[in-house]
Amino acid sequence: MNWRLAVLGYPVSHSLSPQLHEAGLALAGLTGSSQRVEVREEESSRVTALLGTRLDAASVTMPLKSVVTALCDRLDAVATRTGMVNSLWFHDGRLHGANTDGQGLLDALSDEFRFDASGARVVVLGAGGAARSIVDALSVAGADEVVVHARNAANLDWLVQHYDVVRPPARHVEPIDLVVNTVPVAGRDEEEDVLDGVGPETIAVDITYAPHTSPWRALYDAVGCATANGVAMLAYQAARQMQWWFQTSIDGATLLEALA
C-alpha cells in the first residue's frame, strides 16, 4: 500500500506534520507521501470528499478539530469525551476520528523531564481545542488539580463541568508542578507575569513552536524552570497517530529526531 497522508486545516503552510508523516512511514518500512491541504472551517465538508479518495489518513489542525467530529462514523474514547479530533483514518469504508494531542504531550514530558502526571498540580492557560485534550489526558493520568485560565467563559465552564479535577482561576494551586500555555501567540498579552507558585521545580511548556523560544517561555527560563516548546508534543502525538494508522510501533523520541 502506498499511503496518502496530509495535514488539513488553515493555515497549514508552516506545519511540520508532513515531515513527521514521511519520517514515520520510513520508520515503519512503508511507502507513501504527505502534503499540506488548506481547508477552512466553512469548507469542512470537503474532508469527507478527500478521505478515501485522495487521502487514506490525515492530521487535523485548527480550525477543524471540533467540526470534523460530526463527519466521522466512529470516534475513539478521547475524541468522544472532548469533542475534538486531530487524526482521521478512512478504514473499512468508514471515517474514523481520534485525538492524540493530550497523551502526546504527556509522553513527551515523561521522556524529556520524567514527569508523572499522577498527583500533579497543573495550570493550563487557554481553554480551546488543544487545552481540552490536554486537560483530558491529565485527568485520566490522575492529576490532583488542573487550574484553567481562560478568556472564553463558556469553554472554561465546559471543562469544569466535564472534569472533576478542573478548577477556575480563583482556585490557586501552589506550588505548581506544570504550567502549559495553549493560547495562540497572536492572542497573548504583550506583558505577562510568571504565575505565583512557579519555582525552579516547575516545568513550563509553550505548545507553540514558532518562535522556538517565545517571550512567554523566556520568562519561565529566567526564573530557572525547565521549559519546552511544542515540537516534542507534536512529534509524540504524531507517533501515537501513526501507530493507530499503520498498526505498528512508532517511537516518539526517534520521530522527534527527524525534526532536528
Image (tube, rainbow, N blue to C red):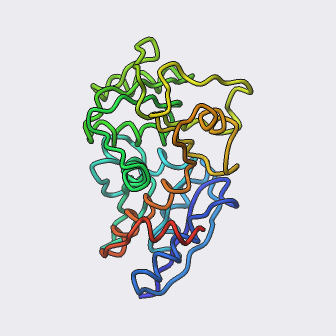
Residue 239: x and y, percent?
41, 65
Q: Residue at x 51, y 72 (%)?
A: 21
Quarter the C terminus occupies: bottom right
Q: Residue at x 62, y 39 (%)?
A: 217
Q: Could you say which quadrant of the image residue 144 lies in?
A: top left
The residue closer to the viewer here, 168 or 255, is 255
The residue closer to the viewer here, 157 or 206, is 206
Up the image or down, 123 lies above or below 67; here it is above
Q: Is residue 122 visible?
A: yes
Residue 18: x and y, percent?
58, 70
Q: Is residue 71 visible?
A: no
Labels in figure, total: 0
Quarter the N terminus occupies: bottom left
Q: Could you say which quadrant of the image residue 189 lies in?
A: top right
In this picture, residue 123 sits left or right of residue 259: left
In this picture, residue 85 sits left or right of residue 9: left
Up the image or down, 116 lies above or below 46; here it is above
Up the image or down, 39 lies above or below 139; here it is below
In this picture, residue 188 sits left or right of residue 76: right
Q: Residue at x 45, y 24 (%)?
A: 156
Q: Residue at x 29, y 54 (%)?
A: 76
Residue 182: x and y, percent?
54, 38
The residue closer to the viewer here, 176 or 183, is 176
Residue 131: x and y, percent?
47, 37
Extreme residue toward the top, this view: 170
Extreme residue toward the right, this view: 190
